[in-house]
Amino acid sequence: MSYKIETQNLSAWFGSKQVLQDITMKIKGNVVTAIIGPSGCGKTTLIRCLNRMHELTPRAKVTGKVLLDGEDIYGENVDPVTVRRRIGMVFQKPNPFPMMSIYDNVAAGLKLNGIVDKHRLDKIVEKSLKAAHLWDEVKLELGKSGASLSGGQQQRLCIARALAIEPEVILMDEPTSALDPTAAAKIEQLIRILAEDYTVVIVTHNMQQAARVSDFTAFLYLGKLVEYGSTKDIFENPKSELTEKYITGEFG
Amino acid sequence: MSRIIDAGLEELSVMLCRMGELTYETVSLSLKGCLNGTSVYSQVNKMSDALVSMSDQAEDKAFELIARFQPVASDLRTIKSYMKIAYDFARYSRYALDISYITKQFGGLKECEKWITEYIEKMSEKVLTMVRTSIDALRSHDTQLAKTIAKTEEEADKMYFEYLDRLIEKAPATSKCTISSVLVVRYLERIADHATYVCESVIYLATGEKTILR
């Protein structure tokens, strides 16, 4: 069976501090994979290693391999920008470009990639906003500032922005933690829909969210992958006592 | 520091243990009545109603815990198992009520030949042992004890079919005895099944393994 992403003995450091230790895991395509674990366990670092964002941090180091469709993204001739184009990211706090309109926020990545044809841009912006389930709410005010939207809408705008450059994988780092429950529920529904066309990896503090949205769950503790399996198995019958204790709230 | 859900789980566990003891008394009383030919129907009826109502309460409590705490892993398995066990206990008591109805309606086994009453007494003892095993295994989440029920379940099953065979070979003198005894062994066999389900649930809640002990 082929996997969309495969990490092999992936380790990461901030300076001399090792934050990930020998993570080997295979992530299936077109499913949602959740990464859970207590604060500081390396969840965010792990997904930042999946699209070469970790190396943007000063004194950060990565060893091991991350295969995307079987090819190591840390290979010698691989351009990290190309990697990030194929593997998009949505962050904890909605971060639309504040000075840009809704339209320009979505089109920004495309323009940077040299697409200037207005008709083509219009089509991609509409398609991305529709895919992010935001189109109906903003179609009449695309010229308005992205910052004028509600928190939940801003997050969906960021998802639309990520989708516009047609990535294959979407990484989400706590995408609902800054949102109210209703807005969070919309994002969760959206995540399920996105998995039909994309591979989604989500980092979440909210275990119930992982249980609701993901097909597979990985539990990380102190930089190590403790358990990784189907979400059903992890939440019904985890193999590791540590996982059991974490998800039932005995620690964390 | 204990988790908030722990108090609810403890409450549910106490409720189930109480149900277990009452269910044992109920089954035991109905069998005694049946073997002696004394009607204990109204008493068993009250006990059985109490158990059905306790089963409903346990289900409500379990639902509340699910709604409020969204339990996972062993917590979720415990709640699911407790709901099933509460139902099994209520079923024990319903079969006990059925047995006491036979006593009330047809005088139990008093018209039966000695070999029949002795046979059913033996089967009753076996099934009561199974009921006790299920209650004790639940109280301490003892999976080893729970597993021992497989052997007695097989024996109880065998006794049930053997009884039917013997009855065909050697028909009792009265049809009252035939009907009463067949129904009693049938109910005993059903109680034995539910005791086995309880033990399977105990293994599941403690280990996550879905075991078939039948």
Image (tube, helix red, strand yellow):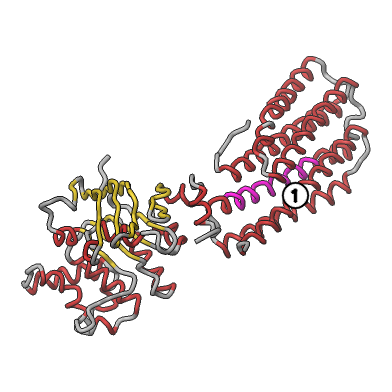
Which secondary structure class fits the magenta region best? helix
> A103 and B14: which one is in front?
B14
Residue B113 versus residue B30 in the image, above or below: above
> B205 and A192: which one is in front?
B205
> B119 and B174: which one is in front?
B119
Residue shown at 31% from the left, 46% from the top: A26
User: Which quadrant of the figure has residue B175?
Assistant: top right
- For disc 1, the neighbor class at 10 Å (few under 14, some 14 to 19, many from 20) is some
Q: Please report the bounds of the magenta region as a residue range.
A: B77-96
The answer to whether residue B91 is visible is: yes
Residue A42 versus residue A133 in the image, above or below: above
Residue shown at 76% from the left, 46% from the top: B20
Decide whether residue B7 is among the magenta residues.
Answer: no
Residue A112 versus residue A38 in the image, above or below: below
Secondary structure under tag 1 reads helix
Query: In the displayed structure, does residue B16 sit left or right of residue A244?
Result: right
The answer to whether residue B64 is visible is: no
**Residue to which mark 1 is pinned:** B17
Decide whether residue B88 is among the magenta residues.
Answer: yes
Percent position (x, y) of residue B25?
A: 84, 44
Percent position (x, y) of residue B192?
A: 72, 34
Q: Amino acid at mark 1?
A: Cys
Residue shown at 63% from the left, 57% from the top: B62
Query: In the displayed structure, does residue A84 sit left or right of residue B193?
Result: left
Percent position (x, y) of residue B109?
A: 88, 30
Residue A207 versus residue A149 in the image, above or below: above
> A131 and B15: which one is in front?
B15
Q: Residue furthest front?
A: A16
Percent position (x, y) of residue B45?
A: 84, 48
Q: Residue furthest top?
A: B169
Residue shown at 92% from the left, 34% from the top: B37
